Amino acid sequence: MDAVRVALLREVLAGTEWLGATRRFAGVLRESVVSHGGGLLLVGTPEYEPWHLAAHLVDEAAWSGTPELAPTLVRHGARRTDPAHLAVGLGRLAAARRGETLLVVAPEGPGAPVLERVYDARRAGATVLALGAGEPQVTAMAHEALAVPEGAELDLDTVQHLVSAAAGENALPTVRGRRRFRDRLAHLADMLTAPPPAHW
């Protein structure tokens, strides 16, 4: 979803709770990775790997000048023969430490192996964020969670677009708490004229 479609979606959602909720969550995400500087780990479930969110966060990191937003995608079926950005397996979660941020994206329960590793990462001091169905065990471990329950007005993919876009925008310069119109317009122009990112 490009910047124009995100802007149109925001117009449609004006007055709903989704805009505020996605911006708050994106602000926590951005603040966590920027202030701690330890890196962002992104993990899903065996059935749902959030590679699309990873690609959007890489874009936002480049466009906003906030390299900390670029995540490491942790995959369930990673193989050593995969390209480097797709070859990080669940063992990486065991190495998560204080200063790192772990974002769990799960449309349903991620399963015991992931829950155990997320719990261990939190005990080691990592910041845990959760985006998904609002599964109680994941939400209980998360420092911040955004639930997208089944049957909600928006699906998880759409919410991920809003979160990634807001995470990049939150990094833009502000004047008295609000970005100037010229800054917003310049950022939009940069996004629309930037070369396409490398495909995942």
Image (cartoon, grey):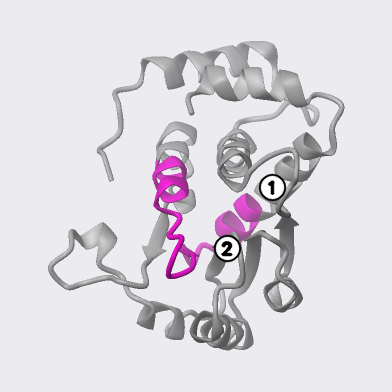
Q: Residue at x 64, y 37 (%)?
A: 170
The quarter of the picture where residue 163 lies is: top right
Q: Residue at the spot x=49%, y=34% of the render?
A: 64
Tell whether position 167 is magenta: no
Which of these two is toward me, 134 or 53?
134
- The image position of residue 16, as x and y in percent, is 84, 32
Q: Nearer the viewer, residue 69 or 155?
A: 155
Q: Is residue 180 above or below residue 81?
A: above
User: Mark 2: which amino acid?
Assistant: Ala
Which amino acid type is shown beneath numbered disc 1?
Answer: Gly
Q: Is residue 17 left or right of residue 77?
A: right
Q: Marks 1/2: CA distance?
A: 20 Å
**Residue 187 pos. (x, y %):** 52, 20
The residue where tag 1 is placed is 27
Considering only order in the chain, which callout, 2 or 1, is on the residue closer to the N terminus? 1
Tell me the residue at 30%/27% (across/down).
196
In screen coordinates, is 181 left or right of 172?
right
Furthest residue to the left?
A: 81
Start-end of magenta stretch:
29-58
Residue that badge 2 annotates = 106
Secondary structure type for disc 1: helix
Q: How many numbered circles does the render carry? A: 2
* Nearer to me, 33 or 50: 50
Whole-percent x and y of residue 54? 42, 50
Residue 142 placement (x, y as % from top left): 70, 71
- In the visual, does 145 lie left or right of 109? right
Q: Is residue 46 magenta?
A: yes
Q: Residue at coordinates 49% horizontally, 50% vertically from top-left?
A: 69
